[in-house]
Image: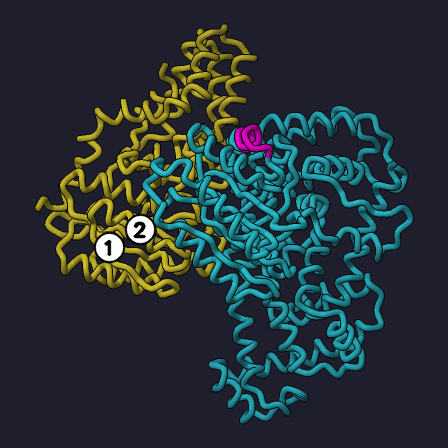
Chain colours: A cyan, B yellow
């Protein structure tokens, strides 16, 4: 997503480079292209026009800060305005160190309200097919991971089998996802009826569910309401009735990130009826340019709290305006990557590994462990896309995650001794490993050779500065396909954090210099 | 039992009734945008400003930058050369441009060759586009035509998807072939083909799991389903329909492109046209690809599906 926007902004950069000043004419010309890019990204027309007007007003006549080129200056202005459109920046204390700044940016977003005495009541609403039921499950998984018990309530009595779907999702979260709290389900499937014939029944269901949750001491209740058109008076009225009856602490509007110009109208209608507290954007993992994010935020003023980024129930991320703005501008999103890595690898493990790498003692066993935690973070392509400068370069590259299966298979077929010291293996060993993993002996040889290069590399990298590391990784990834990239990435926890903070600093620095 | 070939005149038979129905379905839409467009145009003098305002409205209808530019540039050129004299000429010019973009002869449903059955229709689309509901409507329409329909529930991924289709099959009294949740969708397609042949039904409609066009493995799975069908039933699937959500923005063109490439899409169902979304995105899709729109969904009831007709659609866009 957002590639086209990024391209739009790059062309602005190119146009402005070489000019000493931001003049009205060169700014306007650059913004024509930005306007087309934003419209193509489905940002609503009124939002686009207001945005462009603001940027032009900010930019025209501004003296370029000595250290910045006009293009950079312009990107800074656009970044500011984008962040403003998308939401607030987290507060970073004056004079904070790079480490502290990164910490602040990585802090949890607004998330889901916690109340005492419980339960916190969260109501989900949205158009048909926006992804409410799946998001309910993802939200339950998110809460479970944070030790909060959840009751999922099937208040969609219109769509056939919606109640069964939520029941299954609740079961999956309870059974398969990590965390120390119970996820339960409440539903009255016998009350389901054909579309439009059970209007109002949801009110009673929600009331009874909340009582049940209170009796059980559940932390958070999530109400999954039926999808409805914002122009359907009866059904919109039902939502208001539910709201009056159970007084939810938070109401989330679930919006498909691929929505077009209509996003503004439907969001406005839901907001007018219900006073929405937060937005959840779904299907963010598609190649949509995601303009709906800007539109719905702008018309409702409610913060975007989460984005759905995949089919799996743990594919929900907190939304951070500054990170998305950076992503749009092609600056990558190292912080998200580091955070993902942190969720999978403990600080201690990372430190131990780093020490091992520094001594050149990394084994295939460690490598396998890294590979597995890397894979838990998500598909390789989406991870690499978070790195600055790599996202757009990856656009047309096909990265086959199956390659990782093969690597995992090969390591699994090695004996403990071989895993410790892969070194130069006899052909008979390579043949055995190949047979065990369904690969070819040459592939096994390739893997051990690459492994040797990487452990040597990481030993040397341990003593490098952050900038040298980046250069080294770039060289490494230029050498070959995805497999050579994996080892390059596997030092992320330690090495990524350093890079993350520097990237963040430089953006922050630019703001400070200008102000 | 009528044979499958009576599917061919189906849109023709519907043609007259369709125009008025489409107008019904588009009533709200029309008031909000295209009705507004007509009022905007006819109430004013033809000048640069009017053309600019029309451009804004087309963009707001999701017609997209490229298609809007194409329509507006030619309008502007004709205005400058004096071909367009009054605002009424501009209206006609736009209608003609839209008809040309949306039209084309291939709007009828593809079927198995005469004497052969079943006709297999594969229905695809991204998550939440409205596939299952559209299938229910399509089934209703085919049954109204006196054809026997069997459903294949190949969405083994989403929880409750099979049950959802099953409930529709009960309501519409159509036979259904189901698989296990989490099972192989191609295996369900295989079973469904066998059953459809054995039972001698006219049409087999296969539901598939919603998938984003960016998910390579899932897209490849569609190819597998197609080849399984093709091996069982010659020429099948005869029709592969892509369901597009009318509220979708410009990403719809990417969806059409990717599904077209991987799943061999032969037609589009434009769902959820009963909201305030203008569905103008079909213009963008048609401008970028050759896949014809075959049906539009205009409500929640089984009868709320209509064959698409470009002339009727454009007329409805601009009618009072």
Q: Eyeballing the image, is A448 above or below A185?
A: below
- Quadrant of the rendered image containing residue A204: top left
Residue at the far front in the pictured view: A215
Q: Eyeballing the image, is B284 above or below B234?
A: above
Residue A262 falls left or right of residue A5: left
Residue identified by numbered label 2: B165
Residue A506 falls left or right of residue B251: right
- Image coordinates for residue A23, horizontal then vertical, percent: 79, 26
Look at the image and tell me whether residue B139 can be seen.
yes
Q: Residue at x 40, y 50 (%)?
A: A188
**Residues under numbered marks 2 and 1 in contact, where contact means CB atoms less than 8 Å apart:** yes
Residue A498 falls left or right of residue A476: right
Under circle 1, the secondary element is: strand
- Image coordinates for residue A210, horizontal then vertical, percent: 53, 48
Residue identified by numbered label 1: B176
Q: Eyeballing the image, is B236 above or below A491?
A: above
Under circle 2, the secondary element is: helix
Q: Chain of mark 2?
A: B
- Quadrant of the rendered image containing residue A150: bottom right
Q: Chain of mark 1?
A: B
- Residue closer to the observer: A94 or B295: A94
Q: Which residues are magenta?
A: A267-275
Residues beneath discs 2 and 1 located on the same chain: yes
Q: Which mark is residue B194?
A: none
Residue A98 drawn in magenta: no
10 Å crowding of disc 1: few (<14), some (14-19), many (20+): many
Q: Quadrant of the C terminus of chain A?
A: top right
Task: Give the main secondary structure, helix, strand or loop, of the magenta stretch.
Answer: helix
- Image coordinates for residue A247, horizontal then vertical, percent: 57, 39
């Amino acid at each position: 997503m957002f590639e086209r926007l990024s391209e739009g902004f790059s062309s602005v950069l190119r146009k402005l480079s070489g000019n000493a000043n931001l003049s009205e004419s060169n700014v306007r010309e650059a913004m024509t292209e930005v306007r087309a890019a934003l419209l193509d990204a489905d940002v609503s027309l009124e939002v686009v026009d207001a945005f462009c007007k603001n940027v032009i007003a900010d930019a025209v006549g501004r003296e370029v800060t000595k250290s910045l080129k006009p293009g950079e200056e312009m990107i800074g202005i656009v970044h500011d305005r984008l962040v403003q459109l998308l939401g607030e920046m987290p507060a970073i204390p004056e004079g904070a160190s790079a480490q502290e700044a990164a910490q602040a940016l990585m802090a949890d977003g607004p998330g889901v309200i916690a109340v005492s005495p419980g339960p916190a009541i969260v109501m989900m609403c949205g158009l048909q097919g926006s992804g409410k039921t799946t998001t309910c499950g993802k939200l339950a998984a998110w809460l479970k991971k944070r030790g909060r018990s959840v009751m999922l309530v099937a208040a969609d009595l219109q769509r056939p089998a919606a109640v069964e779907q939520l029941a299954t999702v609740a079961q999956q979260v309870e059974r398969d996802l990590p965390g120390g709290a119970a996820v339960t389900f409440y539903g009255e499937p016998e009350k389901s009826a054909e579309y439009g014939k059970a209007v109002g029944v949801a009110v009673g269901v929600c009331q009874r569910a909340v009582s049940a949750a209170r009796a059980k001491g559940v932390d958070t209740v999530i109400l999954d309401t039926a999808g409805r058109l914002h122009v359907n008076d009866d059904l919109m009225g039902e939502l208001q009735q539910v709201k009056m009856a159970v007084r939810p602490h938070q109401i989330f509007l679930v919006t498909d990130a691929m929505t077009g110009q209509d996003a503004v109208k439907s969001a406005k209608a839901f907001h007018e009826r219900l006073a929405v507290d937060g937005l959840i954007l779904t299907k963010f993992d598609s190649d949509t340019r995601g303009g709906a994010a800007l539109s719905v935020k702008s018309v409702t003023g409610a913060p975007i709290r989460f984005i759905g980024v995949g089919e799996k129930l743990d594919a929900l991320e907190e939304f951070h305006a500054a990170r998305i703005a950076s992503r749009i501008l092609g600056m990558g999103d190292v912080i998200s990557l580091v955070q993902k890595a942190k969720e999978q690898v403990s600080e201690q493990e990372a430190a131990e590994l780093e020490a091992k790498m520094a001594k050149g003692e990394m084994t295939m066993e460690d490598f396998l462990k890294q590979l597995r935690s890397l894979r838990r973070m998500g598909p390789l392509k989406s991870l690499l896309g978070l790195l600055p400068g790599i996202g757009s370069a990856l656009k047309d590259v096909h990265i086959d995650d199956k390659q990782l299966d093969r690597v995992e298979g090969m390591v699994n077929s090695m004996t403990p001794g071989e895993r410790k010291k892969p070194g130069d293996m006899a052909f008979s060993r390579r043949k055995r490993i190949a047979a065990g993993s369904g690969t070819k002996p040459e592939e096994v040889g390739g893997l051990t050779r690459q492994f040797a290069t990487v452990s040597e590399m990481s030993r040397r990298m341990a003593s490098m500065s952050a900038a040298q590391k980046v250069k080294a990784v770039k060289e490494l990834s230029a050498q070959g396909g995805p497999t050579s990239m994996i080892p390059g990435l596997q030092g992320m926890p330690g090495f990524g954090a350093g890079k993350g903070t520097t990237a963040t600093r430089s953006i922050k620095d630019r703001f400070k210099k200008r102000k | 039992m009528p044979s499958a070939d009576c599917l061919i005149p189906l849109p023709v038979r519907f043609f007259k009734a369709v125009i008025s129905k489409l107008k019904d379905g588009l009533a709200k839409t029309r008031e909000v945008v295209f009705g507004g467009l007509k009022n905007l145009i006819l109430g004013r003098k033809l000048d640069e400003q009017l053309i600019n305002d029309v451009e804004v409205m087309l963009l707001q209808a999701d017609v997209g930058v490229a298609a809007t530019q194409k329509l507006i540039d030619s309008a502007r050129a004709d205005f400058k050369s004096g071909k367009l004299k009054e605002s009424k000429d501009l209206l006609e010019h736009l209608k003609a441009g839209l008809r040309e973009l949306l039209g084309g002869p291939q709007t009828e449903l593809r079927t198995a060759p005469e004497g052969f059955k079943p006709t297999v229709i594969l229905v695809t689309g991204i998550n939440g586009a409205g596939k299952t509901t559209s299938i229910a409507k399509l089934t209703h329409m085919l049954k109204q035509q006196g054809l026997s329909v069997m459903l294949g529930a190949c969405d083994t991924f989403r929880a409750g998807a099979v049950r959802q289709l099953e409930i529709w099959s009960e309501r519409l009294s159509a036979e259904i072939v189901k698989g296990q949740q989490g099972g192989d969708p191609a295996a369900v397609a295989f079973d469904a083909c066998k059953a459809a042949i054995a039972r001698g039904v006219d049409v087999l409609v296969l539901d598939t799991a919603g998938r984003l066009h960016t998910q390579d493995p899932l897209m490849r799975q569609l190819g597998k389903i197609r080849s399984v069908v093709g091996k069982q039933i010659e020429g099948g699937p005869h029709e592969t329909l892509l369901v597009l959500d009318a509220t979708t923005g410009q990403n719809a063109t990417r969806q059409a492109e990717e599904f077209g490439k991987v799943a061999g899409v032969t037609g589009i169902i434009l769902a959820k046209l009963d909201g305030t979304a203008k569905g103008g995105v079909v213009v963008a899709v048609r401008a970028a690809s050759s896949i014809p729109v075959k049906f539009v969904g205009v409500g929640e009831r089984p009868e709320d599906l209509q064959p698409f007709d470009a002339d009727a659609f454009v007329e409805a866009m601009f009618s009072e």
